[in-house]
Amino acid sequence: RVRARCRPLFSHSASLVVSSGVAEVIVLVGGRQVIGMNQRSLTVVTCFNPQNSKWYPLASLPFYDREFFSVVSAGDNIYLSGGTESGVILADVWCYMSLLDNWNLVSRMTIPRCRHNSLVHDGKLYTIAGLGLAGSLDHVERYDTITNQWETVSPLPKPVHSAAATVCGGKIYVFGGVNEAGRSAGVLQSFEPLTSTWSFIESPMIDNKYAPAVTLNGFIYILGGPYARATTIYDPERGNIKAGPNMNHSRQFCSAAILDGKIYATGGLVSSEGPALGNMETFDPGTNAWTLLQGMPCPLFRHGCVTIKKYIQSS
């Protein structure tokens, strides 16, 4: 088995250690790398400290050749769920313990899934929709990090995979994706946890897949997608969807996170044929503009991107 490599923007002498310094960092988890005409899965996990603009290595993923998983942070730990490995859809869930810098298996999901979404609401980890053994899923379940138990909650009205999902104002929102017929699902589905009920609206303006969603200042931002530099902004209070400023690059299968009141979009494919991007860019709502940032350790796509607090060297 072969590990794909990233160029060394960091050295192990700069590894994260428990010290007097703590910073909120952006963590890139696994993903895919294009090498010539081939693709390889990455086991590398790295983090970016915006305070000094340096990258640091974290504990690598404990498996090979896994893709189409979902990654989310809960507190300062990271959870990686599902995905496929050698064509098999998985229910495994791994937890990265920030203080220990290692990965451990926790309770499996109740069903295997890939191309799904995961998010955290009220301290619970939700895994939503995706592809299962019999096709697109409407299945939703949530995980209690204290009891290490999963429970099934109300299903989606419309089964989808490869959607965009986020939490805003105490509700869960799932945008678009791919429906059971293999076409773009022009639907916005929202979940009210207090009543455990879903509602949905269908609109031709909701046409996204392979694109992440993040929440900032009460607005939901959907980033990129097939051949797209687009930023789509949804206002849950007013129910309005509008176009925001374009990113500097088209980003399909990119990933994104919020840090210090800004959106960071990382990696992705320029088109379905590539190339993969080895950079990231940030959106500042104050200037309403995207700014291209320095390179990542390597070009990648279909990766996880989250923020956690991590102890680092003060030097």
Image: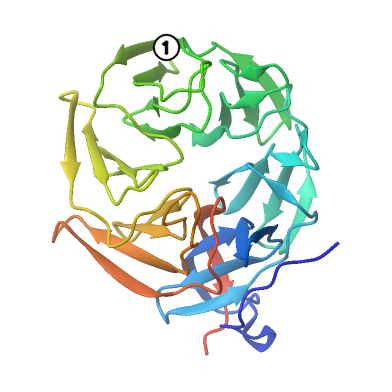
Horizontal side of residue 32 vs 210, given as left or right: right
Q: Residue at x 66, y 68 (%)?
A: 58
Q: Quadrant of residue 239?
A: top left
Q: Is residue 221 visible?
A: yes
Residue 258, quarter of the rendered image: bottom left
Q: How many marks?
A: 1
Where residue 260 sits: x, y (%)? 33, 61
Q: Is residue 254 left or right of residue 114?
A: left
In the image, taking residue 265 as reference, residue 109 lies left or right, namely right
Between 279 and 57, the residue placed more toward the observer is 279
Taking depth in this image into account, of 170 and 79 the one nearest to the observer is 79
| Residue at image point 68% right, 35% down | 146
* Residue holding disc 1: 198
Q: Is residue 218 visible?
A: no
Asked which secondary structure carries label 1, the reply is strand
From this view, report whether residue 189 is shown above or below residue 117.
Answer: above
* Colour option used: rainbow
- Residue sitting at 64 percent across and 86 percent down? 11
93 to the left or right of 56: right
Mark 1 crowd level (few <14, some 14–19, many ≥20, 10 Å Cα):
some
Give the percent coordinates (x, y) of residue 107: 78, 33
Identity of the residue drawn at 23% across and 33% down: 234
- The three-letter amino acid code for the residue at tag 1 is Trp
Q: Quadrant of residue 250?
A: bottom left
Q: Position of residue 105 (x, y in %)?
A: 80, 44
